[in-house]
Each structure stands twice: as structure tokens, then as C-alpha cells.
Image (spheres, helix red, strand yellow):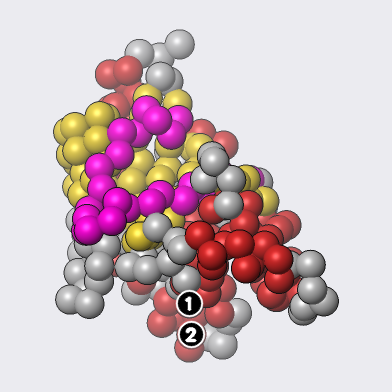
């Protein structure tokens, strides 16, 4: 088995190659902590800090700038989204790709939209990574994180009751996802690409799609605007 030092070197080489292809975008190396920020003045949740590893932060602007191409091409709106942070790191001989999205308030539309932002960013960064000589999708474990202030308990209770009503497929997909993600104690769910209706309708191959991805819901404490998480609690 390769040692930790060699894995670290692989990731640094990986981001160096990405930076050589796209020199406009920063591929920052950070020890111990990495900060993902929401810069909007109206945002109530402004920062997520990942800690306790050595991180390579991929400039999320690189996927944001791809959005205009898909919009001009008239592509599905699943490609019109992007998340706030894309981070890779290695622990215990495994490589991880963490995609994070910060939301100010808990709203079902916003939380479901965050899922689409994470899906879209994964697809677009995978497209770019496949240009690299050292990238294999199977080498990375992808996980998504949706961060917001806590939901109102009555809100989730009412959504749970409403799922038994005869609603359309879009509502059902949204409510099922949110309840699986936020209603239980674990605050996580496993998302398969086949769970997303918009992906089902597209003629996509599997090279840029995840087989499955764990998604976590992270509650920011009341009256706080940031939260710090240890990666070892999520791997």
C-alpha cells in the first residue's frame, strides 16, 4: 500500500495539472483547515470550515463559469447550477471529493436546489478532471454537504404529512429527499444518479456521473453564521 506521503504528492500533482490546464483558477493547498465562504451580504450562513486534514481546494468559479456554456447551448437546467466549495483530500489511503453548499435558511425549495447544485458541480468538475492524465473517477469517494440554519420542527412535520397526499412526481421527489436527509437522527441519505428525474431524461454516460453519493445535512447553531467540521466525522 502506498504511504500517506505518496498520496499527498498525487493530489498535489493532480491539482498542479489542473492549474496548468486552467491557470486562471486557483488550486489552493491548505494544511489543517480550509474555509468555504458565502459572500452575499444577505447571507446568514457565511462560512463552513473543514478541519483536520491537508486539503486541495478547487476554485469553484471554474464550474460556475461553465454554466454560461450550458445555458447558451439550451441544455437542461440541471447544468445551470453550482455549489460553493469543492475540496479534495486523502485520509487512511482513500481520496475524497467533498462538495459543499451553504444556505441561509431552511426552505424545502432551497434544500432541494442545493442537491441540484451539488449534482451539477460534480458533473462539471468530473468533465474537467477527465482531461487529466492522473484522474480515475473510481479513486475518489464523493460526498455532498448542505449547510443551513435549523429547520422549524413543524415545517418538517407538515411535510411528512403532506407526502401522503396525491401530489405530482416533482413534489414527491423533493419531499422524499428532504425527509430522508433531514427528518432522521443521522441527517444523511445516499443519493443515486438514478434518483434524479432530470438525469434520467438525459443521454449521459457514466464517466461523469456518480454511482452513488452520500449527502449530509449540517445544521448551523442558532445565532451562529459559521460552523467548523472535522473531516474524520464524515469519512
Report whether residue 17 is seen. no
The Cα atoms of the two marked residues, 1 and 2, are separated by 7 Å
Residue 94, quarter of the rendered image: top left
Q: Is residue 179 left or right of residue 70?
A: right
Numbered label attached to residue 26: none
Q: Residue visible at 67% across and 62% down? A: 160
Report crowding for label 1: few under 14, some 14 to 19, many 20 or more residues within 10 A (C-alpha): many
Q: Is residue 29 left or right of residue 86?
A: left
The answer to whether mark 1 and mark 2 are in CB contact below 8 A is yes
Bounds of the magenta span? 212-235
The spot of residue 100 in percent (x, y) is 38, 54
Residue picked out by circle 2: 71
Q: Nearer the viewer, mark 1 or mark 2?
A: 1
**Residue 15 against residue 41 in the figure, above or below:** above
Judged from the image, the secondary structure of the residue bearing numbered disc 2 is helix
Residue 231 counted in the magenta span: yes
Residue picked out by circle 1: 80
Front one among 99 and 71: 99
Q: Is residue 152 left or right of residue 8?
A: right
Residue 9 counted in the magenta span: no
Q: Quadrant of the C terminus?
A: top left
Front one among 147 and 63: 147
Amino acid at each position: 500500500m502506498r504511504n500517506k506521503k505518496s498520496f499527498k504528492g498525487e493530489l498535489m500533482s493532480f491539482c498542479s495539472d489542473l492549474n496548468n490546464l486552467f491557470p486562471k483558477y486557483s488550486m489552493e493547498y491548505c494544511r489543517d483547515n480550509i474555509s468555504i465562504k458565502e459572500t452575499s451580504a444577505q447571507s446568514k450562513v457565511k462560512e463552513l470550515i473543514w478541519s483536520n486534514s491537508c486539503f486541495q481546494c478547487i476554485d469553484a468559479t471554474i464550474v460556475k463559469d461553465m454554466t454560461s456554456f450550458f445555458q447558451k447551448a439550451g441544455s437542461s437546467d440541471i447544468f445551470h447550477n453550482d455549489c460553493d466549495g469543492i475540496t479534495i483530500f486523502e485520509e487512511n489511503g482513500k481520496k475524497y471529493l467533498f462538495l459543499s453548499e451553504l444556505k441561509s435558511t431552511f426552505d424545502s425549495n432551497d434544500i432541494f436546489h442545493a442537491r441540484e447544485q451539488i449534482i451539477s458541480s460534480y458533473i462539471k468538475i468530473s468533465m474537467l478532471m477527465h482531461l487529466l492524465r492522473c484522474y480515475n473517477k473510481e479513486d475518489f469517494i464523493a460526498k455532498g454537504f448542505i449547510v443551513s440554519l435549523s429547520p422549524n420542527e413543524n415545517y418538517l412535520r407538515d411535510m411528512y404529512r403532506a407526502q401522503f397526499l396525491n401530489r405530482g412526481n416533482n413534489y414527491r421527489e423533493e419531499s422524499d429527499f428532504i425527509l430522508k436527509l433531514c427528518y432522521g437522527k443521522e441527517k444523511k441519505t445516499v443519493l443515486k444518479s438514478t434518483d434524479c428525474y432530470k438525469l434520467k431524461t438525459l443521454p449521459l454516460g457514466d464517466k461523469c456521473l456518480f454511482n452513488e453519493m452520500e449527502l449530509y445535512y449540517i445544521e448551523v447553531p442558532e445565532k451562529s453564521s459559521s460552523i467548523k467540521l472535522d473531516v474524520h466525522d464524515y469519512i
